[in-house]
Amino acid sequence: MAKLTYYGHATWGVETKGTAILIDPFFTGNPLTSVTPADVRADFIILTHAHGDHYGDTVAIARRSGATVISNYEIVNYCQKQGVTNGHPLHIGGGYMFPFGRVKLTIAHHGSSFPDGTYGGSPAGVVLEVEGKRLYDAGDTALFSDMSLIGQAGLDVALLPIGDNFTMGPEDAAAAAKLLRARTVIPQHYNTWPVITQDPEAFKRRVEEATESKVVVLKPGGTHTA
Ligand code: NI
Ligand code: MN
């Protein structure tokens, strides 16, 4: 069973059969976690886009651990220039079967520049297939109707931003949940800073009234087994 750990904001750990995967490893400066980049294990790091609150500690963790960075071509190339040895570039719509499972990049409507202003390619969502489970991390995005295509093959878990301001707010994220029809929805990208303050329990009620999805609200450090 794949175990998801939420580190707050949009930072996730996925453990599957002894392989440790980090998604958007933002630890330094993340007010929701006291975990540091030195504390975490990583064999692979998946990045949805280059913004600082997602790219985060990628280089420090990958240089220490030798983890392979999986992201779009521009991001992998940038990380390799920062001294990351192992990278696997994908691009939107493309997937690849890694030793732990399949990773596919999907569209996201957002931006993707690095903190220093370097172009970070197109932002992405991620579909991760591990141990027969399909997880979708929407990344940072607006609502878009093609989410129904992403949901078509069946999703066990959908990680959806609800913070508003930079991404979908709760209303659009609830509409996204309707299109995705995932078994479980977990909200992310909220309550990190005052500007993205949201009530995840209100989101849970809203989605569970309108869809058959179950909403799991995780506190930072909380886990969910898919
Ligand atoms: Ni962003
Ligand atoms: Mn963000």
Image (cartoon, grey):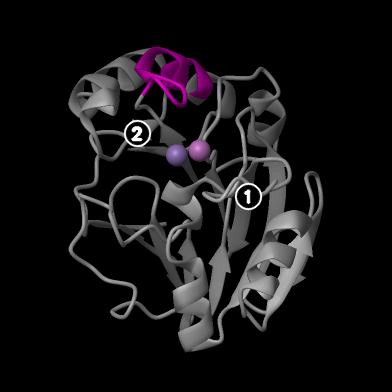
Q: How crowded is mark 1: few (under 14 residues within 10 Å), some or many (20 or more)?
A: many
- Foreground: 128 or 86? 86
Q: Tell me the kind of residue under disc 2.
A: Lys
For the point 69% across and 72% down, the residue is 81
Marker count (numbered): 2
Q: Which of marks 1 and 2 is nearer the N terminus?
A: 1
Residue 31 horizontal side relative to residue 25, left or right: left
**In the depicted structure, whether residue 146 falls above or below residue 63:** above
Q: Mark 2 points at which residue?
A: 214
**x and y percent of residue 200 in the render?**
23, 29
Mark 1 vs 2: CB contact within 8 A: no
Which residue matches tag 1?
A: 127
Q: Is residue 175 magenta?
A: yes
**Amino acid on which disc 1 is placed:** Val
Q: Nearer the viewer, residue 199 or 83?
A: 83
Q: Which quadrant is the N terminus positioned in?
A: bottom left
**Above/below status of 85 relative to 206:** below
Dot 1 lies on which element?
Answer: strand
Q: Does the magenta stretch include residue 38?
A: no
Residue 20 seen from this side: no
Taking the image as shown, residue 75 lies to the left or right of residue 198, namely right
Nearer to us: label 1 or label 2: 1
Residue 80 location, x and y as percent?
A: 69, 74
- Decide which of 137, 190 is in the foreground and name it: 190
Region in magenta: 164-176
The tag on residue 55 is none
